[in-house]
Image (tube, rainbow, N blue to C red):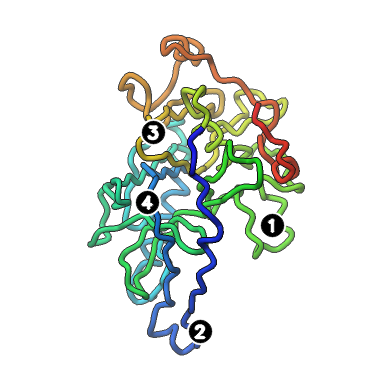
Amino acid sequence: MRAGLIWPLVASTVVVAHAGAPEQKETLRATRPQWIERPWELDYVVQVDSSRSHRVAKKWATDHNAPKNLSDRLGWAGVIDLSHQISINPMFPGNDLVISRIEFDPQGIVTTPHTHGSPLRGRLTDRLDIVLATGDGPRDPVYPLGPWFQGFGGSEHWAPTLCSRSGNDHADPALPSDHKTMYLYGKGYRHDEFVASFGCREWAYQLKDPDRPYIDVTSYRPGAKPANTRVHPFVGWAYAGQARKPVIGLNLGQWYCLLDCPQGEVPGRIDDIRLWAKRNGWQAPRQPKQMPMFPDSTAERGDDHGD
């Protein structure tokens, strides 16, 4: 297990002032969050989504990022394009999986091509958000990537981890109660074919486990047949200096390698998952005993220890 990776909460107690007067917001961006100064540790951040949702997000971000809006929080999909796309069904191209990876150098500078116009740098804010910073000025906007969740006591096997801001794997206290039934790790979560059971905790657990050669991002459900099992949108990441693990998933009865495929394979279909695993000297993936693996009910007690 990698040591020293819990980023202390005590470092997040900086008080930040914001432009509070309504008339100011029309002509001035809000004061950005302050940084927690520490060495940058992420190799990449990746988002996987359907091609239909990606198009919507890209259009929204492009419109939202317009200078006239004076927003202090911009949409990164408006300046960073997809890395590659995997065809799921030629008859329904909107269901293709779009992979967008943002890579960093050791100082946190984004090395992935983008159209922002000046360098972007990965930063941790005093609110424990991972963002792409456009500068260090008090009113330089940021591109949020997601919350850097610290976990609970005894959850070092999956925490800290980067969660999705727009997904269902991070509890937002601002959400109305009827939306909290969608929260992946809460008591109200119910399995559904169209709701993810895989989230940021399952990603981090597999990433940190030295005995796991790949990361399986399948949203398994009890009793669900492979044909009704999906890869849902998710956010992933990796530590700098750590060997990149292949990312695989079962989607509508077909296995795919999504990212960092072994032996230089091109991302795409895996014809036979057992033969694929054997060829690489690995065990074939198996469904965890429960999904999600680390619900709050056990994680808060320190009783979650994987499968």
Circles 4 and 1: CB atoms closer than 8 Å: no
**Which numbered disc flags the more N-terminal residue, 4 or 3?**
4
**Which numbered disc flags the more N-terminal residue, 2 or 4?**
2
Between the C-alphas of marks 2 and 1, the distance is: 28 Å
The answer to which of 183 and 15 lies nearer the viewer is 15
Between the C-alphas of marks 3 and 1, the distance is: 37 Å
**Which numbered disc flags the more N-terminal residue, 2 or 1?**
2
Q: Name the residue under label 3.
A: 242
Circle 4 or circle 1, nearest the eye: 4
**Which numbered disc flags the more N-terminal residue, 4 or 1?**
4
Circles 2 and 1: CB atoms closer than 8 Å: no
Which type of secondary structure does the marked residue at label 4 adopt? loop
- What's the mark number on residue 277? none
Which type of secondary structure does the marked residue at label 1 adopt? helix
Which type of secondary structure does the marked residue at label 2 adopt? loop
Image height of 161 relative to 277, above or below: below
